[in-house]
Each structure stands twice: as structure tokens, then as C-alpha cells.
Image (cartoon, rainbow, N blue to C red):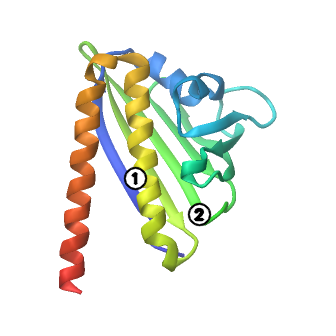
Amino acid sequence: MQDPIQFKQSFPIRSRPDVLFRLVGDPKKRMRWDKSLRKFQYDGEEKLQVGSKMKGLLQWKYGGMAFQTKITHLQGPNRLSLESLRPFGLIEKMSQQWSFKPMPGGAEVTFTFTVVPRFKFVRRGIERMVQGLFAETLLELQRAVDSSTAGAMEEAAQDIAKKQREERKKKKKKA
């Protein structure tokens, strides 16, 4: 198994944790704001609980891959974890962890996105794709609830991308 590719970001959003929890966890609500998905729906019983399965389809720019996921951890309205059930496309495993911490004026959202590529030779391409997917998901969630700070989120995402490019260059020079 390959080393996982992991992105993690914490940021404040001017919305209540329970609202954010529903936006992220409920496939019907997620389809309204998450532009990285072409399709996302329950697979079976339509209930937000541990073990609930969902089917999704990514946009073409993210490979257009179909995947099946399930809720592995649920502590509403503070935590939610999704994990893929089986490999899809060039991805061996995918997981998302969302945390919503109440704070004055809104909530602090922590989003961790982990992907394990199937093959070593596709790692760089998958990493670029996942980075774009991660940034777009964060930005679209921010826009869905608070468009005024979405610009600041976009700048932060660009800074993260720049830092990661610099780190890769440093690793390349050492090798």
C-alpha cells in the first residue's frame, strides 16, 4: 500500500455547527454546494447514521470516478467521518474527516482529506487532483454559508498550494 496523501485545514465559518454538519453530511444538501460532485446520494436507507452508505460521482475534471462511501464516525453536530468502501479508479482508499467546533460568531471547521493512490507512478497526478478537490470543497462550503470570507479562503488555499510546491522542490533537491 502506498503512503497516504493528506490535506488538513482549519478555518472559521460564520455559521452554527449543526447547520454545517447537515450541509456536509446530508447528500441532498451537499449536492447543492459541492461543485466537485456530479452525483451524491444515499445507497439504501436515507438516514444520517454510522454505517449509512452513499454513492457518488466526481466531476470530469477530477477523473469522473464513481465511488461508494460510508459513514464511519458520527458525533452530531461536532464530527463526521466518511470512508470509501472499495478502490475506485486510481484511488485505493479515500476518507474525509470533518470537525465543527463552536466558537463565538460561528464555528471552527477542520477538514482532513486523505487519499491512498493505487500505484506509485500516479501519485503526483493524484496529489494534484486531490489538492484541487480539497481546495474547491473548502471554498464552496465557505461560499454556501458566508460569501464575504470566501475570498480570504481562496487566498489561503493558494498559499497552501505554493508551500506544498516549495516543499516538493526541496525534497527533489535533496534526492
Residue 74: horizontal and vertical position, in percent? 55, 34
Label located before the other in sequence (1 or 2): 2
Mark 1 → mark 2, Cα distance in angstroms = 14 Å
17 vs 52, left or right, is: left
Nearest-to-viewer mark from 1 and 2:
1
Q: Which residue is mark 2?
A: 91
Quarter containing the N terminus: bottom right
Query: Residue drawn at (27%, 33%), measured in percent from left and top?
Result: 153
Question: Residue 2 or 102: which is nearer the viewer?
Answer: 2
Residue 162 in percent (x, y) is at 22, 55
> Residue 132, how many percent across, how many down?
42, 49
Question: Which image quadrant for residue 15?
Answer: top left
- Three-letter amino acid code at disc 2? Ile
The quadrant of the rendering that contains the C terminus is: bottom left
Describe the element under mark 1 as helix, strand or loop. helix
Residue situated furthest right in the rendering: 44
**Element type at mark 2:** strand
Residue picked out by circle 1: 131
> Mark 1 belongs to which amino acid?
Gln
Task: Tell me if residue 156 can be seen.
Answer: yes
